[in-house]
Image (cartoon, grey):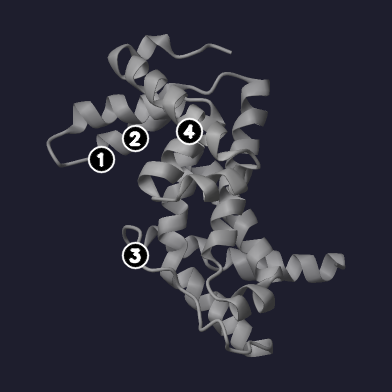
Amino acid sequence: MSRARAKCCRSRACLFLPRLQHSGGSGRGRSVGISPDAHVPGSKAEDAFEEFVRGRSTHLFRLALVLTGWDRAAAEDVLQIALERAYRRRRLLFREGSAEPYVRRVVVNAAIDWRRMLRRRAEQPLDLAAGLAAGDRTGLVADRDVLVRALAALAPKQRAVLVLRYWEDVPDAEIAAMLNCSPGTVRSQASRALTRLRELSRDPSAAPSD
């Protein structure tokens, strides 16, 4: 792909990121796509991509936010990467149906890569999560704060397994394909992550300092 075309893809995807803060999307919702037997040339692929971004970007941004330990800038970068790649493959993705499984996979792996890079550079502070909990008005602020901090302290792949398994309701086989491992590894990662999450929830100071 030429630099000019790549720049165009980035610009197209970036158009939608500022809308995330104002979008009213919530929860898992339905996956936005078109009929698998539809032919999606040219402008139809553009329209399908824009519909997908409008309908699912808020949820995907929240997913990126959780996976990056509630680092808003990193979550925006991760989602932008995913949307850029989806835009480049829009004709194939929307001809086959929903683009969400592909975009979710890119978000997950980009977030894991980002966290690993961050861990190599410096410790990820747990206080990154404080802002999210501070805005909660359900009366469970303290418990949520502990949970958010504990989740942010997990290893990147362990956090991804928990988020995909319990928040996204993704089957173990799909998680395994997404993370390039076996379903057995997914189950063992989930078990270890839950154990670690309980430890961190009881004692947040037990977070690693590497």
Q: Check disc 1 and give the amino acid type.
A: Gly
Q: Could you say where residue 138 lies in the image, as x and y percent from the top left?
A: 14, 41
Quick check: 108 above or below 33? above
Q: Nearer the viewer, mark 2 or mark 3?
A: 3
Residue at the image point whose x is 63% and y is 87% from the top:
40
- Mark 1, Cα crowd under 10 Å, few <14 / some 14-19 / many 20+, is few
Residue at the image point whose x is 21% and y is 27% from the top:
143
Q: Check disc 3 and give the amino acid type.
A: Gly
- Name the residue tied to disc 2: 131
Q: What whole-number distance in Å separates the C-alpha atoms at marks 1 and 3?
A: 23 Å
**In the image, is 155 to the left or to the right of 202?**
right
Q: Check disc 2 and give the amino acid type.
A: Gly
Q: What whole-number distance in Å separates the C-alpha atoms at marks 4 and 3?
A: 26 Å
Choose between 115 and 23: the one closer to the eye.
115
- Name the residue tied to disc 4: 187
**Reading the chain from its start, which is encountered first: label 4 or label 1?**
1
